[in-house]
Amino acid sequence: MAIFITGASSGLGQALARLYAAQGHSLGLVARRADRLQALVNALPGSHHVYVLDVCDRKALHHAACDFINKVGQVDVVIASAGISAGTLTEQTDDFAVFQSIFDTNVMATVSTFEPFIQGMIERGKGTLVGIASVAGVRGLPGAGAYSASKAAVATYCESLRLELKPMGVGVVTIAPGYIRTEMTAKNPYKMPFLMAADDFALRAAGVIKRQCSYRVIPWQMGVVAKLMRLLPDWLYDRLAVNAPRKPRKSRD
């Protein structure tokens, strides 16, 4: 298979790249950090294609996607794994730029990642688009308005896209990670239940993608938590979550 992965230089994207390369697939790998991306590719078996760019640069992302399509012929799976996180407070007006950056990276870049591949998948009547949501998007968390809202948006967007493309034979899979051991979660100053290694996440995510599941929380224990969170009435959720630990705000110089 030919697989296109954004956010490949670290975290979930890197773990997925390692897994799929070990399985013998041809990869198109996108990330901002050239040194880390090249180090990853040097350590992977097989021959792969590297694209150093910021996923918020829609033109550059489309150019990379088209180049990968031209080189491999057809792309089977596209994984929009690039994402960022930071605590935000609306009353802190300088956090507006952080809100915008999180939405641009987590939501709009997911759209930009999928755009160049959809027509070819429709013409072939097959292919899979994978969006990375989060358990943090199931309900709003205090101090994480931007991140929770962006991941809720990813999940809802992917659901709409799934309904649009299903009649044409194109699959859309939404994966909502719980706590996965990555550089992003390493910054969290609180206990993280059911913390999972990134490589274990990648193995389970690949299975979800292969089975064409519409939506799946990984690990499954967090899936149970997510279902309970959805069922709680607002008054009870508010009482339980109002003092929940918060993501650190982005440091200011």
Image: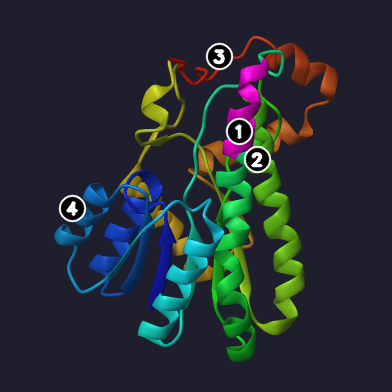
CA distance separating discs 1 and 2? 5 Å
Instruction: Please name the predominant secondary structure of the magenta segment in the image.
Output: helix
Image height of 188 relative to 121, above or below: above
The span picked out in magenta is: 93-102
Q: Mark 3 vs mark 2: give the one in front.
A: 2
The residue identified by callout 3 is 245
CA distance separating discs 3 and 2? 19 Å
Q: Quadrant of the N terminus?
A: bottom left
Residue 150 image label: 2
Q: Please indicate, yes or no, whether residue 235 appears anywhere in the rendered image.
A: yes
CA distance separating discs 3 and 1? 14 Å
Residue 5 drawn at (x, y percent): 42, 61
Q: Are marks 1 and 2 in contact (CB under 8 Å)?
A: yes
Q: Amino acid at mark 4?
A: Ala
The residue identified by callout 1 is 147
Q: Earlier along the polypeptide chain: callout 3 or callout 2?
A: 2
Q: Quadrant of the C terminus?
A: top left
Q: Are marks 3 and 1 in contact (CB under 8 Å)?
A: no
Q: Are marks 2 and 4 in contact (CB under 8 Å)?
A: no
- Local crowd size for mark 1, using a 10 Å CA cut-off: few (<14), some (14–19), many (≥20): many
